[in-house]
């Protein structure tokens, strides 16, 4: 596969001197000897022997050290998913507590102070600790399998990302348990969140949790972009890339562009609170609205960062269960991209009541409405796929139907609140609460539950129980409608958001009671889902590599996948590789099996480009995460923490990136 | 193994936070018990400049001393009751400066509370009867914080108003100030 | 399915319920120009959206129920999964066009509704400054004649048919002025001047509520709006300009003495008495108002007792301290406050 060209060894400093030439020749002979020892997969090494060699090379060290040091994308993805689901459960418990409080008017069950913590924690947990991370987790697990590679790009950064996320979540929840949970809302508007009106450390903890999760999300986004663009199997051109991978590419780019806005905003908030800067102090020529602009410049794309992966899930499920590729692949891709771009142009629709110039508002109305065009096209494409194919209504597909029925309502109420005159009434009422739960639960959580059912056999090797799954679906679906449909009414009847109680006599009793009942039905359904997942782990039917008869590459490997993913890197010739051809995937051979190595391909055409060594497991990402975490937490208490805390960070990062021994590799990496 | 590891992380994190911040955040919107009074032995006759006898610290001091919410409420009262009129934003004017470490009537929070409640000669009015005991203690907590007495992490860095000098979170501890400079 | 039947019953009950509460605090109130235009636009949007939703659901149901012969479908089993029904492409273009047209129509409708709201709200005859505080509303009726300038709290009176300019300011955090039956929201932002013009079209009593989360007692920051005839309004204004009535019996006199010299006077103002605090609601005509503690409680003797005795238990975290009055002081204070008609 490789030949050493003489030029490679002539050094960089001009013409070699005679004895230098001798030395080079000796070196050449030595390298040639070493090259003979290199083991590659290929005609001579296949089957079980190959699997054993690869397993020995790719396995991480055992024990707790190995657990902390792992760089396997499947382990990290699984941790991400499980941690995010735990936060979903915690956030859900908060929601149930709030619903209990709101079940009756003038209720004294939960006090104002605790309730304000509850809704702040609910929003922050769901947005920052559940919705975005769970999408990242699923993507980090599945994308390398789906694009046919052995690991993500930058696997250590990937490990670092998870630990940052975990520490951020622990910080927030540890604080909440100690009754210093943030209480300024998940949006933390200044000046309420500023030093005067939020004394104590509550808001600082919120702001630093944001810092943790944004570092984690940025790291994961970089990993995803590079994995998707450079690690695809040969032949998987951009045009053949699965729609879920497209969705995650768009999302990762959106994360990279939107997260810095909230980093800036929360950084200035922390600096206002810690050292008395005046960024948001109107009396000193700061501006309270600056926060809102920066926050929503992140906050609105955030909604699509949550929603677009879910559209990817829907595309995956529709494709498999309708037994045909999604209609108009190119249209769906363009819809994803245009949604990603439009998402950055409509943040002001969160600020229609702040009294900005009205002509400007019209622009944002038009922009907000236009985002429903690509979404409408995607929905058409899924429906057309169903109409044209032969849908099988197994559990994941049921969730897709539930998604369409529910999400479209949320989308249409979204069109309503995009109009300034309507928004001025509906803004910050329960109508909006209903709207975004239809969008986020109907639009993202339903597909997520579907896709978890769908990929569960791939991750665990066993199927989830079908009957429990169907019961669970109907409970979630009907419970959701019962919980959130009445909120449209309570909003129209004048119930504002974020109130810990409401007076009797405004007609709000019945809708609130219904919402509470519905919320508990959803809660039960989630418990059922978890029970199903746990029981199926031990009792479920053995799945086999491709239980759903799906077309994409992740189903070409065993369930659960081996640590090295693919014994031979597959070659892709269509966008439904497992459906086309004679059932056997063509493969490339020649990657080393005695060392961890990945095949990189070109960005557009996915022709083989480089063989890339893969980082070994390392404790340094974990240690770096701890060092950075200490800076973030300690800087709540003293600005000096930043100066002193950077030293351990620098040490950890230096150790992490310490160059390998500069010995000449037996062969050039570039072919 | 992994779950035990996570659990221990959680305990560690929670413990550190508890140590750092717990009692500084306590909300007590209603002073308990209702109808509390400034302690005996704190009457004006017993505290005069240079008095050497120090009665024991009032037990309520710890409720207010480093409590972020009390300090914040005190800050608001400081503006509402127009303390600014004489003491400025702590720098002093018609009344003495509050930011330095010079205390004519005692630097302890209960002594400050007594000063606010009873008034002092040369213009400091008595606020007993105008403010409740709890409010007086809030105010005392804020006034104490002006000189950097309580821990820095319980005070606010600034108010949402015109800037009044160095943020409180950054004011040096009285030990390190040049008290001569502060007096001027 | 019993779930569905329950759902239908619930929707019906909600509809009926909505009708009976349309006046007090509801988007259906339509008691001012904006409220009416809002409702018209809302029904237009709802109609268009329901139509689009029906189309989607119809397509979904058709896709589910469509009978297919095994050899007919474009699926992997027939080997034709890369083909599509020839009609689909045309339908896709049609669907895109339909969404485009629908959205354009809605955007134009929204634009013109916005314009006409702005036009209807011109020619202000009366200027009121509403200042948000944690957690109550300070209200000032502005007049060129200083003796006619009126300060009150938590209850806004508006004359029928007169365009009123409401200038909005905040003393602390961001609040939002929202009287659903009259008009949409407008935020009160520290350091910024905002405002809203309202033309009330129906007499009645309406409830408004702060709509931007503003801290612990955000839920109890309500506002009573009374829309009355011009004559009634002027009568009310003139009455409110009067100083507080003098105490007439020993009990109210004791209350007067306590209120005007004790802790109440440090924060509250009572016109014509020594009580001149400026940081809490004006109490000059407290008993003439319909609610207490920014809409937290209806006005009445019992609630006055409860509120004065222990405001922190009724509205925890609010800025009024629990004083711990002795019983006879409490009787006297409440008796005096009741005379502030």
Image (cartoon, coloured by chain):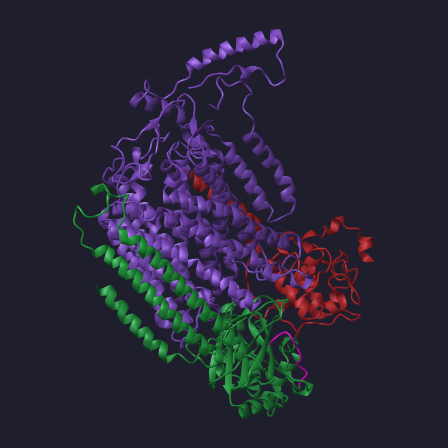
Of A429 and C39, the residue lying toward us: C39
Place of residue A137 in the rendered image (x, y in percent of width and height, measured from the top left): 41, 43
Place of residue A649 in the rendered image (x, y in percent of width and height, measured from the top left): 59, 37
The answer to whether residue B3 is magenta is: no
Of A66 and B124, the residue lying toward us: A66
Quadrant of the image containing the N terminus of chain B: top left
Drawn side of residue A278 relative to residue B92, left or right: left
**Highlighted magenta segment, given as a residue range:** C273-282
Residue A10, placed above or below residue C116: above
Picture quadrant where residue C186 is located: bottom right
Q: Is residue A516 visible?
A: no
Shade of chain C as shown in the rendered figure: green
Picture quadrant where residue B82 is located: bottom right
The answer to whether residue C277 is magenta is: yes
Looking at the rendered structure, the number of numbered marks drawn on it comes to 0
| Secondary structure mainly formed by the magenta segment | loop
Place of residue C274 in the rendered image (x, y in percent of width and height, measured from the top left): 68, 83
Residue C110, placed above or below residue C292: above
Drawn side of residue A99 relative to residue C220, left or right: left
Say which chain is red. B
* Residue at point 66%, 87% (across, down): C272
Residue A611, placed above or below residue C328: above
Of A121 and B13, the residue lying toward us: A121
Place of residue A409 in the rendered image (x, y in percent of width and height, measured from the top left): 35, 62
Q: Is residue C42 visible?
A: yes
* Residue at point 46%, 32% (across, down): A69
Quadrant of the image containing the C terminus of chain B: bottom right
Of C337 and A494, the residue lying toward us: A494
Say which chain is purple. A
């Amino acid at each position: 596969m490789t030949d050493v060209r003489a030029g490679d060894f002539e050094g960089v400093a001009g013409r070699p001197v005679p004895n230098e030439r001798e030395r080079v020749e000796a070196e050449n002979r030595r390298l040639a000897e070493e090259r003979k020892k290199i083991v590659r997969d290929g005609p001579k090494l296949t089957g079980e022997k190959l699997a054993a060699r690869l397993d020995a090379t790719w396995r991480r060290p055992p024990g707790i050290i190995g657990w902390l040091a792992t760089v396997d994308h499947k382990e990290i993805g699984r941790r991400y998913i499980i941690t995010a689901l735990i936060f979903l459960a915690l956030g859900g418990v908060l929601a149930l507590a709030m619903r209990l409080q709101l079940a009756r008017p003038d209720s004294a069950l939960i006090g104002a102070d605790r309730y304000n913590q509850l809704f702040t924690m609910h929003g922050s947990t769901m947005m920052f600790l559940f919705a975005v991370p769970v999408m990242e987790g699923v993507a980090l697990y599945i994308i390398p399998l789906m694009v046919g590679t052995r690991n993500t790009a930058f696997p250590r950064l990937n490990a670092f990302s998870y630990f940052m996320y975990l520490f951020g979540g622990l910080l927030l929840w540890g604080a909440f348990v100690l009754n210093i949970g943030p209480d300024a809302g998940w949006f933390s508007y200044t000046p309420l969140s500023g030093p005067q009106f939020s004394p104590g450390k509550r808001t600082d903890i919120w702001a630093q949790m944001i810092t943790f999760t944004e570092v984690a999300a940025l790291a994961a986004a970089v990993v995803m972009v590079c994995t998707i663009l450079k690690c695809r199997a040969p032949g998987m051109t951009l045009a053949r890339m699965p729609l879920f991978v497209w969705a995650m590419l768009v999302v990762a780019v959106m994360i990279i562009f939107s997260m810095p806005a909230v980093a800036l905003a929360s950084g200035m908030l922390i600096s206002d609170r810690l050292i008395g800067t005046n960024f948001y102090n109107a009396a000193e020529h700061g501006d309270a609205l600056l926060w809102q602009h920066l926050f929503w410049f992140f906050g609105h794309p955030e909604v699509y960062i949550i929603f677009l992966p879910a559209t990817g899930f829907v595309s995956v499920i529709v494709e498999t269960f309708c037994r045909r590729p999604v209609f108009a692949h190119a249209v769906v891709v363009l819809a994803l991209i245009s949604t990603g771009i439009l998402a950055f142009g409509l943040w002001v629709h969160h600020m229609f009541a702040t009294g900005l110039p009205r002509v400007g508002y019209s622009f944002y109305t038009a922009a907000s409405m236009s985002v429903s065009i690509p979404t409408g096209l995607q929905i058409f494409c899924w429906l057309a796929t169903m109409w044209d194919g032969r849908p099988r209504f197994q559990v994941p597909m049921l969730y897709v139907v539930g998604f369409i029925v529910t999400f479209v309502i949320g989308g249409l109420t979204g069109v309503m609140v995009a109009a300034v005159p309507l928004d001025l009434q509906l803004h910050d009422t329960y109508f909006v609460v209903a709207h975004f739960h239809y969008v986020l639960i109907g639009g993202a959580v339903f597909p997520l539950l579907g896709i978890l059912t769908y990929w569960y056999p791939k991750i665990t090797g066993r199927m989830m129980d079908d009957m429990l799954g169907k019961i669970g679906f109907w409970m979630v679906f009907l419970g959701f409608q019962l919980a959130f449909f009445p909120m449209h009414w309570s909003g129209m009847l004048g119930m504002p958001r974020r109130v810990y109680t409401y007076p009797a006599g405004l007609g709000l009793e019945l809708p609130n009671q219904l919402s509470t009942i519905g919320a508990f039905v959803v809660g039960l359904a989630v418990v059922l889902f978890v029970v199903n997942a746990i029981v199926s782990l031990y009792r479920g039917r053995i799945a086999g590599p491709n239980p759903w008869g799906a077309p994409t590459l992740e189903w070409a490997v065993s369930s659960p996948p081996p640590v090295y993913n693919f014994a031979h890197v597959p070659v892709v010739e269509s966008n439904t590789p497992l459906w086309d051809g004679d059932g056997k995937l063509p493969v490339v051979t020649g990657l080393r099996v005695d060392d961890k190595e990945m095949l990189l391909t070109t960005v557009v055409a996915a022709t083989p480009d480089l063989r890339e060594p893969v980082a070994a497991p390392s404790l340094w990402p974990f240690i770096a995460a701890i060092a950075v975490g200490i800076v973030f937490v300690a800087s709540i208490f003293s600005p000096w923490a930043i100066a002193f805390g950077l030293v351990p960070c620098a040490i950890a990062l230096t150790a992490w990136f310490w160059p390998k021994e500069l010995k000449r590799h037996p062969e050039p990496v570039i072919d | 193994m992994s779950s035990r590891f996570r659990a221990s992380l959680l305990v560690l994190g929670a413990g550190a936070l508890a140590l750092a911040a717990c009692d500084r955040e306590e909300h007590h919107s209603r002073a308990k018990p209702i109808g509390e009074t400034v302690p005996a032995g704190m009457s004006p006759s017993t505290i005069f400049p240079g008095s050497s006898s120090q009665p024991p610290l009032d037990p309520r001091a710890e409720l207010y001393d480093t409590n972020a919410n009390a300090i914040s409420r005190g800050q608001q009262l400081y503006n509402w009751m127009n303390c600014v009129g004489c003491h400025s934003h702590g720098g002093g004017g018609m009344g003495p400066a509050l930011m330095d470490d010079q205390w004519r009537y005692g630097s302890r929070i209960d002594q400050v509370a007594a000063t606010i409640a009873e008034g002092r000669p040369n213009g400091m009015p008595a606020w007993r009867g105008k403010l409740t005991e709890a409010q007086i203690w809030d105010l005392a907590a804020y006034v104490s914080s002006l000189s950097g007495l309580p821990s820095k992490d319980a005070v606010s860095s600034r108010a949402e108003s015109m800037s009044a000098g160095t943020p409180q979170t950054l004011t040096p501890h009285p030990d390190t100030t040049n008290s001569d400079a502060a007096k001027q | 399915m019993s779930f569905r039947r329950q759902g239908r019953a619930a929707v019906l009950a909600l509809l009926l319920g909505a009708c009976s509460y349309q006046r007090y605090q509801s988007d259906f109130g339509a008691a001012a120009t904006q409220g009416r235009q809002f409702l018209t636009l809302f029904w237009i949007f709802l109609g268009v959206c329901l139509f689009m939703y029906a189309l989607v659901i119809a397509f979904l149901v058709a896709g589910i129920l469509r009978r297919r012969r095994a050899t007919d479908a474009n699926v992997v089993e027939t080997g034709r999964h890369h083909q599509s029904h020839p009609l689909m492409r045309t339908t896709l273009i049609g669907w895109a066009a339909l969404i485009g047209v629908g959205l354009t129509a809605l955007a134009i409708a929204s634009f013109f509704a916005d314009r006409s709201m702005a036009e209807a709200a011109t020619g202000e005859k009366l200027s009121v400054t509403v200042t948000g505080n944690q957690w109550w509303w300070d209200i000032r009726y502005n007049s060129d004649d200083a003796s006619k300038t009126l300060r009150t709290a938590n209850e806004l009176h508006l004359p029928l048919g007169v365009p009123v300019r409401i200038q909005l300011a905040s003393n602390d955090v961001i609040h939002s002025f929202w009287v659903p039956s009259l008009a949409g929201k407008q935020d009160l932002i520290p350091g910024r001047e905002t405002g809203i013009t309202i033309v009330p079209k129906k007499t009645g009593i309406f409830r408004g509520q702060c709509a931007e989360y503003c801290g612990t007692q955000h839920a109890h920051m309500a506002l009573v709006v009374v829309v009355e005839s011009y004559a009634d309004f002027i009568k009310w204004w003139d009455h409110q300009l009067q100083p507080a009535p003098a105490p007439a019996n020993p009990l109210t006199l004791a209350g007067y003495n306590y209120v005007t010299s004790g802790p109440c006077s440090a924060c509250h103002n009572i016109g014509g008495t020594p009580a001149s605090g400026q940081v809490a609601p004006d109490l000059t005509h407290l008993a003439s108002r319909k609610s207490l503690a920014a809409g937290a409680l209806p006005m009445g003797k019992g609630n006055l007792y409860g509120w004065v005795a222990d405001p922190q238990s009724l509205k925890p975290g609010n800025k009024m301290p629990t004083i711990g009055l002795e019983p006879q002081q409490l009787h006297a204070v409440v008796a005096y406050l009741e005379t502030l008609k």
